[in-house]
Amino acid sequence: MERERTYVCIDLKSFYASVECVRRGLDPMTTRLVVADPTRSEMTICLTVSPAMKAAGVKNRCRLYEIPEGIDYITAQPRMTSYMEVSAEIYGTYLRYVSQEDIHPYSIDECFIDATPYLELYDLTAREFADTLRSAVRAETGIPATVGIGPNLFLAKVALDISAKHAPDGVGELDARSFRESIWRHRPITDIWNIGPGIARRLAKYRVFDLKGVTEMDPDVLYGEFGVNAEYLIDHAWGVEPCTIAEVKAYEPESSSTMNGQILPCGYNFDDTLMVLREMVDDSVLDLVEKHLVTDHISLHVSYGRGGDG
C-alpha cells in the first residue's frame, strides 16, 4: 500500500505589492501600497494591495477611487517583467530543496510541492519543511509567504486559502478529520477551490450552501445537474483528490484558452471603456505568460445595458 503523501501549497503574499515594497526597502507586511497605473486615471484597477491596505479595509482588485480618503499609501507602477524575474528567482530557491519533478507552479505567485520524499530526507515534519522553504524565500528575496499543508492537492489548497488566513503563523494544515470539522460547514462555499458563483447558484437551488450539504445530496441529482463534473464536486466534498503532481505534469490538453471579463458598475464613455479594455488586455497577456502560451486568435464580446447603442 502506498504511503500517504504530503503536499505543500505556497502562496507569495500580495506578491506584486511585496515586490514593490522590497524594491523600496520597505516592510511588505506593514507598508500601505497598491500596484496600479495612476496615469490611467482614478478608475484604474489595483492589481494587488499590500496586507496593510487589506487590514485597513481596502479590497484587492479595487479601483483607485474606491480607496477611502484618509488612508495614506504608495502607488506603484506595475512592472510585470520584474515580477516574473522575482518569481523565477524564488522557483530557483525551491529547487535547492526539491526536485523539479515535485513542483507544480500554479501561477506566478503560487505553487504546489510534493513534500513526501523530503520529510524523511531532511528529517523534518511537514510544518518544519514548509517553514524552511518560506524562510529561505524571505531571507533571499524579502517576500513573505503563507502555506497550506495536506495529504492531497485539494486539501493543501483549501488549507492555504482558508485555514492559513486565520493562523497566526500563516500556516494552515488539514487532514481528513480536520477538514470535516473546520471546512465542511464553511460558508460562503465559493471560498472553496474550484467552486465559483455559477456552481454555488446551482447548488443553492437545492438549498445546499456548504460542502457538508453536498455530501448529503443524492449523487444522481448531482450528476443530473453537473454531468461528469459532479465527480470532482463529490470527491472534494469528502476531501478526496486522487490526482498527483506527476499526473498534472503528464497531462497535455488538446487546446488551451483563457478568458477575462468585467461587469462595469455604471455606464462608461468611450475613453473609460478603452482604458478598461487595455487593463483586461494586460491581465490576459500576463495570464498567457504564466501558462507559457501564445495565441493567434482574440475575440471580444460586449453587452450593453439599458439605453446602450447596441
Image: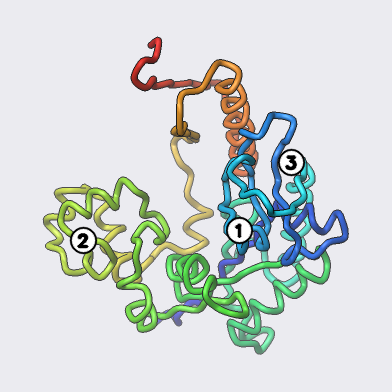
Q: How is the image coloured?
A: rainbow
Label 2 or label 1, whichever comes before in sequence order: 1
Residue that mark 2 sits on: 208
The answer to which of 51 and 1 lies nearer the viewer is 51
- Foreground mark, 3 or 1, reads 3
Label 3 or label 2, whichever comes before in sequence order: 3
Q: Residue 267 location, x and y as percent? A: 46, 24
Indicate which disc residue 110 carries. 1
* Residue type, mark 1 in image: Glu
Gap in angstroms between the C-alphas marked 3 and 1: 19 Å
Numbered circles on residues, count: 3
* Residue at 74%, 48% in the rendered image: 83
* Residue type, mark 3 in image: Pro
Is residue 127 depicted above or below 100 in this figure?
Answer: below
* Residue at 66%, 34% in the rendered image: 42
Residue that mark 3 sits on: 78
- Badge 3 marks a residue whose secondary structure is loop
- Side (left or right) of 223 relative to 56: left
Is residue 246 depicted above or below 280 in this figure?
Answer: below
Label 3 or label 1, whichever comes before in sequence order: 3
Q: Residue furthest bottom?
A: 123
Q: Callout 3: 10 Å neighbours few (<14), some, many (20+)?
A: some
Q: Residue 99 location, x and y as percent? A: 67, 66
Residues at marks 3 and 2 touching, judged by CB atoms closer than 8 Å:
no
Q: Quadrant of the N terminus?
A: bottom left
* Residue 103: quadrant of the picture: bottom right
